[in-house]
Amino acid sequence: MNFCIIRVNLSNIVSGRIVMGYLISASKEHCAGSVFRKVAGVIALFCIGWAQSGDGGLLEYERNTIDVYEKTKGSVVYIESRRSLRGLSLPSGTELPRGSGSGVIWDREGHVVTNYHVIQNADSVMVFFDRDKQFKAELIGIDSTKDLAVLKVDAPENLLDPVRVGDKQDLVVGRKALALGNPFGLQKTLTVGVISALGRQIRASETRTIRHVIQTDAVINPGNSGGPLLDSQARLIGVNTAIVSRGGANTGIGFAIPVHTVKRVVPELIEHGVVRRAGLGITTLRDKASELYPGEGVVILNVPQGSPAQAAGLRGVSRDSQGKTIVGDVIVKINDTVIRNNDDLAHFLEEQVAGDLVQVTVKRENQEHIVACTLVQIN
């Protein structure tokens, strides 16, 4: 007696995929190939229809996208910054919108994370959970060097759905990335792409850059700023902040502040209102502010009396008996890190802790000197 058994992996049927098993024969002769194909085809069609009947034929990729949206849409808010009108024939206290963006709920205490540029120069900020659920926000703290700000709203607990926060190791080029926000005021808009690159650098101001930035091709448009960049596990992996565009619309190149930077800055802003950082406790000359020192490095302008920097022997700018300006020390390296400008100095110090002893290499009268200096806490 000849018979065939078609083995089907049921676990793969449930996930929407069919993996046909192999042919088993009870006789010495295997079942005919044509018979196998016909039977397998019938079973495959039946199984595919059964597997898709419960979710409308969604692909696994689509199911994941929907799942991420459903899990995180309650964590995203619409932010409107307002300016008071003064000197016009309007009632006192009249405010008009001046800009908008997105934000993400950080915790159940009502803290909301957004971009600094979204609320910059605002007289007041409103946070919208839905069109009919809006609350005036309190500004808790800002870090303009990272384009981050923390707001707080006194909203009912049932509206506060904090986002899950990922980790640095979740950042991998090619990984799925989803941007959720309010582009052009269109609330809770989702776009999907991938992490296109890591370690990008964008400008936060004329003198400071933001480093280690995520690049993504998930569509980001004006109004997405401050909203979350998410991974396929519905975890926050970045805060959307900027795009490369000549006309203001998306060109497939967007940027997000990485999650490890967000996790370092936000708790500091919540607790202290500012980010406390380690520093040398000195004043430096602005890059290319004068022709005092045209080379690379950071010119020390002033060393406070009684500071660790003075105790270490660092020297600032001074004047000779004829009133001529004399450059003292120019910082060119700290430990093994080359310091070319104030931006390099700031980024190095961000990774340090007050109380650390560092080796500062300075140029003084065309000679290099190494000075051991203890870092202090600065705001």
Image (cartoon, rainbow, N blue to C red):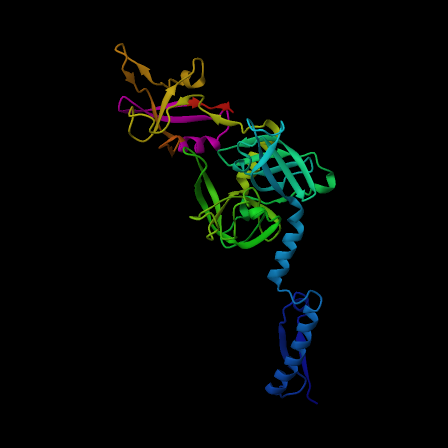
Q: Does 238 appear in magenta?
A: no
Res. 89 image quadrant: top right
Q: Residue furthest top?
A: 321
Looking at the rendered image, the quarter that the N terminus falls into is bottom right
Whole-percent x, y for residue 233 in the image? 61, 52
Count of marks, rendered view: 0
Whole-percent x, y for residue 66 in the image? 64, 57
Q: Relative to residue 346, is residue 184 depicted above or below?
A: below
- Left or right, residue 373 beside residue 49: left
Res. 327 image quadrant: top left
Q: Nearer the viewer, residue 37 or 265?
A: 265
- Left or right, residue 28 beside residue 198: right
Q: Residue furthest front?
A: 89
In the image, the segment drawn in magenta is 343-372
Q: Relative to residue 38, is residue 206 depicted above or below?
A: above
Q: Residue at x 69, y 38 (%)?
A: 108
Q: Residue furthest bottom?
A: 1
Q: Does 357 appear in magenta?
A: yes
Q: Relative to residue 177, is residue 128 depicted above or below?
A: above
Whole-percent x, y for residue 11 in the image? 68, 66
- Left or right, residue 242 beside residue 84: left
Res. 104 image quadrant: top right
Q: Residue at x 53, y 27 (%)?
A: 276
Q: Nearer the viewer, residue 110 or 211?
A: 110
